[in-house]
Amino acid sequence: MTKFEIIMPKLGESIIEATITRWVKNVGDTLEEDDSIVEIATDKVDSEIPSPVEGKLIETLFNEGDVVAVGTVIAIVEIEGEATEESGKPEEKAEMLETEVKELSTAVKEEKPPIETSASDFSQTDKFYSPLVKSIAKAENISISELDGINGSGKDNRVTKDDILAYLKNRKSGATPPKPAAPKVQLPAINTEAGDQIVEMDRMRKLIADHMVMSKQVSPHVTSFIDVDVTNVVNWRNKVKESILKREGQKVTFTPIFMQAAAQAIKDFPQINASLDGYNIIYRKNVNIGMAAALPNGNLIVPVIKNADEKSLLGMVKTVNDLAARARANKLLPDEISGGTFTTTNFGSFDSLTGTPIINQPQVAILGIGAIRKKAVVIETPQGDVIGIRSIMILSLAYDHRIVDGALGGMYLKRMKELLENFDVNTII
C-alpha cells in the first residue's frame, strides 16, 4: 500500500487560493476514480475535486471553511501498490489532478511555482499569506511583524502581491506608506425582536454584497431610460420559435436578440465598452457581454459571452442557452465568468418594468432590460396619427459618470431602440 496526495488544483489564471466548502467524502470512505472528494469555492466559481485514483481516504488536512493555497496537499488517499520515484513527485500529482477537475479552464497558463518558505517562519502570526507573498517576503528579508503591519487590499484585508511590492518600493525610497483615504463606515446598530430569524449570508451572497457596495463607492452612477417598440421582435419570435426548436433543438428567447443589439450598439459607440484606471481610460478591443443570471438559491452569477459582436443570431441563441443552463447547474468554467467588458441584466424575467442596475466593476455601464407589455400607443403614419396595440419595453442604462456623460448614454440607448424597432421580421437563422 502507498499514499497518494490530493492537491488543491489551479482553477484559473488569476486564482491563487480556494475555500473548502464541503467534504463530500469522509475519512475511511472508499474512493473510485473520478469520485468527488471535496467541494471548493473561489471568488469566481464553485467547483469540486474528483479523485484521480482508486483507494481509501485516510486523512483530510483542512476543515470546511478553510482557505487553502493552490498546490497545497489537502487530503491523503491510500492506494494499492508501491510508491515509485515517478509517482512520488508532487508536481506530477498536481498536474494529474488538475486535468481531472471538472470546472478547470483549458486555457490556464503555466506559472513558475513560488519559492517555498518554511512554515516555522510564519508560526508567529495568525494571518493568511499566499505562497507568492511568503516568497517575496523571504527574498526581501521582511520580518513577520513587518509583514503583519502592511495594509492588505485583498479579500478580508489580505496582503496581495501588489500590496507587498508597493510596500517594498516605499521602503527602499524611504517614503511612508500611504494611509487609507477615508475612515471605515460605521454601520448602524440593529435591534432584533422576538421571533426574528438571523441567517448568515452564504459565501456567494457575501461576495455579491461586497461587490455592489464597492461599485457604488467607486462610480458615480447615472441611469437613463428609453421605451422601445419591440412588436417586430415579438412577431418574428412567435413565427420562428417552433421551427427553430424542431430544427436546432434550441429555444428562442428574447435575450439573444437583445444581446446582439447590445453588441452592435457597442460597435457604434465603443466608448461604452471601457474601464477606468485612475485617470486613464481603457477602451476594450473585445466586446465581451456579461449576462446576469439568477440561480435557484436566489444568488446571481454573470456568465460572459466572449466576442459577442462576432456571433450570428443563431450562434447567439446557442451560446445564451448553453451558458444559462450551465449557470443554473453550477457547471460554468472560471474563464466563462471573467473578462466581461459590458453587462446586461433582465428585469423582465420577473415581470418588472425597469430598474436601476449597479455597474459591474471595472466596467463603466450596464444595460437593464424590462418586461415587454402590450400597450395602446400613438402610431404616426403618412395618413395621420392612429392608436394601435404594440409591444413596448423599457431599457435602462446605468453608467459611470466619470467618463460616460448623459449624451453618450442617451445615444447608446437611442441606437438600441433603432436596432430593435427596425428588426427585420423576415430574418432567417
Image (cartoon, rainbow, N blue to C red):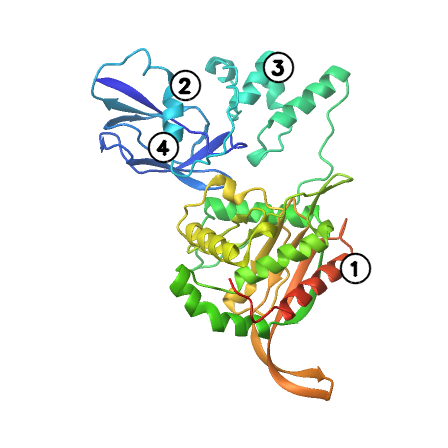
Relative image position of residue 243 (x, y in whole percent): 42, 68
Contact, mark 4 vs mark 2 (Cβ under 8 Å): no
Quadrant placement of the N terminus? top left
Q: CA distance from mark 4 to mark 2?
A: 15 Å
Q: Residues within 10 Å of mark 2 (few under 14, many from 20)?
A: few
Contact, mark 1 vs mark 4 (Cβ under 8 Å): no
Identify residue type, mark 4: Glu
Q: As drawn, is 163 to the left or to the right of 220?
A: left
Q: Looking at the image, can residue 188 be seen? A: no
Identify residue type, mark 2: Glu
Which quadrant of the structure image shows residue 265? bottom right
Identify residue type, mark 1: Ala
Residue ID for mark 1: 407
Residue ID for mark 4: 100
Which residue shows up at 68% across the image and 82% down it?
379
Which labelled disc corresponds to residue 106?
none
Q: Of tags 3 and 4, which is closer to the observer?
A: 4
Q: As drawn, is 407 to the left or to the right of 273?
A: right
Q: CA distance from mark 3 to mark 4?
A: 38 Å
Which labelled disc corresponds to residue 91?
2
Which quadrant of the structure image shows residue 48? top left
